[in-house]
Image (tube, rainbow, N blue to C red):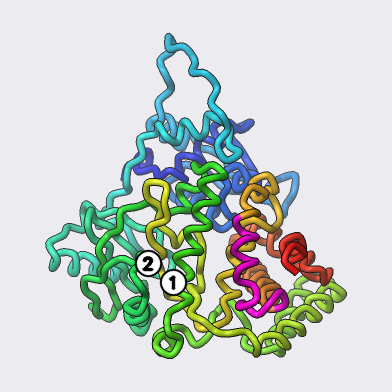
Amino acid sequence: MNRTAGLTMPDFAVLLRLSEAPEHRLRMAELAALMGLTPSRITRVVDGLRTRDLVTKGRDPADARGTITTLTSTGLTAMREAHPPPPRERAPSPPRPRTGGRPPVLAAALRRARFVSVPVVTHDIDSNPGPQHVAEEILRTHGADLSNAQRGRGWTNTTWLTDELVIRVATEPGAADLLREERLVKLLPAEVGYPTIIDSGVCQGHEWVLTRRVVGENLEEVWPLLDHTARSRAIGQMWERARHIHRVDVAAAAPHARSRSPFFPRSASEVTAALGRLVKAGELSTAQAEGLGRSLDRFWTALPGAPKVLNHGDFCTPNTLWNNGEVVALLDFEFAVIAPVAIDLNEVAKMAFGPRSPEERAPLQDVVRLIVESTLDTAGGPDVLVGYSIMLEMWMLANELAADDTDEAERADSAAMLMAFAEGDGGYFAPLLADIR
């Protein structure tokens, strides 16, 4: 495969940022902040570039806890081929206003770059060929050709996109979430925007679902190009579509939603044990664990009074489609769960109230305040919202500690959220909750 071709917008933006950095090197945390992406998302982008020898990753010699990403000569060539420099005789363009906190050169370059889809190469896609063979067979049955399809970025399933179709195939054979999700999304109103399901089944032991492709781009990928007004509008429109999910009849959805989310412990005893493990790992002090425990005690007390609804369960920009300045669909309901709406609400709150990049978060706070203010009572109140946020950050921190290649920025963010919540005043959500109480 030609490693200098097939750059997505985030790929190109990372290469451009690195090309402008001293010695073509940046810490992962700096790169995430400059891009306006989450630590986990920037890690996935960088890891994809690393497999094509466009960048390298290594420990920061000045701080062993940090990770440095370095542009390779191949990466520099790929960036230049996607965005050739202007002719020398051309007069420089006048300065452009900043877009979403990014220097004008990045916003302009991203719009001019020649992005192309990564073609599927049948001999070099998966270490596990099963999903690919299934996708080939199903697409062929429906008159499509996998060789010209674009490989999607799904992590729990493998995904391919043709001009008109999208096929998702379970990574491993056996029971999976795809057919359960198919039954669930049939209950969703059209306002959610979920793609039309064409066919589904099991092939070679792998569950699969074929849908009509919705015109649009992954919101997380275009997020760096959006100014603050567009980002605020996107958050509001995401939540408006999510409200239609929350109105689905719980009794009808329950057989097809998850009985519990893997991100949240089932009981107070499980939470206590998880806090103990974080203390033992040196991520939290005993006093901080006790402070979090008090907040979680209030969560367990308030939880029985919180109405339950169908939650998306993984409500975020990567699961959102954006087209012509509008949110057009919410996708991927494999983590949908019946629980207080605080699970989805927490994801909205974190977009504007959290550690790092205050200049990026502050312009989003007005729309997030309106959403939280209108929803908090039915979510169970502040104690339920904070409790779910604490447990999610605990899961994320434990997940990073167990990873072979820890994302230090993600780890630091989760630790910062937990330490702030341990103070007992609402942590990073304190300004948000103070306005509402």
Which of disc 1 and disc 2 is earlier in sequence? 2
Q: Position of residue 237 (x, y in %)?
A: 47, 58
Q: Residue at x 58, y 85 (%)?
A: 307
Which residue sits furthest top?
Answer: 89
Rendering coords of residue 219 (x, y %): 45, 53
Q: How many marks?
A: 2
> For mark 2, what is the residue?
191
In the rendered structure, the answer to whether residue 134 lies left or right of residue 187 reads: left
**Type of amino acid at the residue the image marks with label 2:** Glu
- Along the line of sight, which residue is nearer the eye, 261 or 19? 261
Q: Is residue 279 left or right of residue 244?
A: right
Q: Secondary structure at mark 1?
A: helix
The three-letter code of the residue at mark 1 reads His
Prevailing secondary structure class for the magenta stretch in the rendered image: helix
The range drawn in magenta is 367-383
Q: Identify the disc placed on residue 244.
A: 1
Secondary element at image label 2: helix
- Counting from the top left corner in percent of width and height, residue 133 is at 23, 68
